[in-house]
Image (cartoon, rainbow, N blue to C red):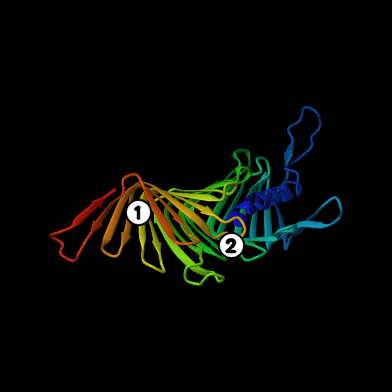
């Protein structure tokens, strides 16, 4: 997810910067006279490129049409590429660039794809340059090698490397486990996390925090975690789940048995769960009229 999010600012900057220099909005007038507006202009099959000081291509933008009216530039079928340590591609059917503010609005089939296949898809994406804010109210789907995350609405501050999915979050993420694969062989395991949202991502600390009606299911065992808040930490290199810390009304469901506690820490490598804060185990022997509660 962090690669796709990091691409937002770069792409929107280069799109806005490229079009800011295409056409001056007014023709200079003689002193004391009102400047005359330039008539609308259309470009067919435009192709713009930018280069580094060393002469290497840094980015390019292609499109079918560009309609320029004053400070507003409307583009269709945008296809942009950024080149560097991580090549990234952005496509959208429509775009609107405000040359005065640098703000960019992308619409219809917006897709950001990194060199190694990570993608972010949504219907609209807006960048407000002065606020360092990337925003959409539409559904967002982020796919990487080890995760698929979906949610309704998103806000991101690229310079701070922070992003938030606002609501209806569903995350299917791979963990790493040695338990099923033996001592010298690791086997993948998957956890599906759902929450009412928001979900906040911090790329610096490699964490994602889920809030409001959070539920995580370990798909290999069916064990289910429920809590008010879950903080997921990722392995920096593999981008798989490293550990999960649950706090606030924690429940661990294993079959018909339920354990309640104040805090639970799940480590993905050994699939171990440690409960603290006076855990209580509720055992259901099959007779729903008689249940035994064990307290620590």
Looking at the rendered image, the quarter that the N terminus falls into is bottom right
Label 1: few (<14), some or many (≥20) within 10 Å?
many
The answer to whether residue 113 of the structure is visible from this angle is yes
Name the residue at the top extreme: 32
- Image position, residue 125 (x, y; %): 56, 52
Circle nearer the viewer, 2 or 1: 1
The secondary element bearing badge 1 is classed as: strand
Chain-order first, disc 2 or disc 1: 2
The answer to whether residue 79 of the structure is visible from this angle is no
Q: Nearer the viewer, residue 244 or 195?
A: 244
Dot 2 corresponds to which residue? 119
Q: Nearer the viewer, residue 281 or 127?
A: 281
Q: Residue at x 63, y 43 (%)?
A: 159
Q: Is residue 102 above or below residue 293?
A: above
Q: Nearer the viewer, residue 36 or 181?
A: 181
Q: Is residue 237 above or below residue 220?
A: above
Q: Residue at x 57, y 66 (%)?
A: 145
Dot 1 corresponds to which residue? 226
Name the residue at the left extreme: 289
């Amino acid at each position: 997810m962090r690669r796709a999010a990091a691409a937002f600012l770069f792409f929107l900057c280069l799109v806005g910067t490229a079009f800011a220099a295409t056409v001056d909005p007014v023709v200079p007038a003689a002193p004391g006279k009102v400047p005359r507006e330039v008539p609308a202009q259309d470009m067919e099959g435009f192709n713009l490129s930018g280069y580094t000081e060393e002469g290497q291509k840094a980015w390019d933008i292609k499109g079918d049409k560009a309609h320029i009216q004053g400070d507003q530039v409307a583009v269709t079928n945008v296809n942009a590429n950024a080149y560097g340590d991580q090549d990234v591609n952005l496509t959208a059917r429509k775009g609107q660039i405000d040359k005065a503010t640098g703000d960019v609005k992308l619409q219809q089939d917006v897709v950001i794809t990194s060199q190694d296949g990570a993608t972010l898809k949504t219907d609209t994406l807006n960048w407000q340059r002065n606020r360092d804010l990337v925003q959409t109210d539409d559904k967002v789907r982020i796919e990487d090698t080890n995760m698929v995350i979906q949610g309704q609405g998103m806000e991101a501050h690229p310079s701070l490397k922070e992003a938030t999915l606002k609501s209806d979050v569903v995350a299917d993420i791979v963990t790493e486990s040695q338990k099923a694969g033996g001592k010298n062989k690791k086997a993948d395991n998957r956890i599906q996390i759902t929450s009412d949202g928001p979900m906040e991502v911090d790329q610096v600390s490699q964490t994602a925090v889920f809030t409001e009606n959070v539920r995580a299911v370990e798909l290999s065992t069916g064990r289910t975690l429920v809590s008010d808040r879950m903080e997921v930490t990722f392995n920096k290199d593999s981008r798989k789940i490293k550990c999960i810390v649950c706090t606030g009304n924690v429940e661990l469901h294993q079959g018909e048995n339920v354990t309640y506690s104040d805090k639970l820490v799940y480590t993905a490598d050994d699939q171990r769960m440690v409960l603290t804060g006076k855990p209580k185990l509720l055992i259901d022997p099959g007779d729903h009229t008689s249940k035994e509660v064990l307290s620590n």
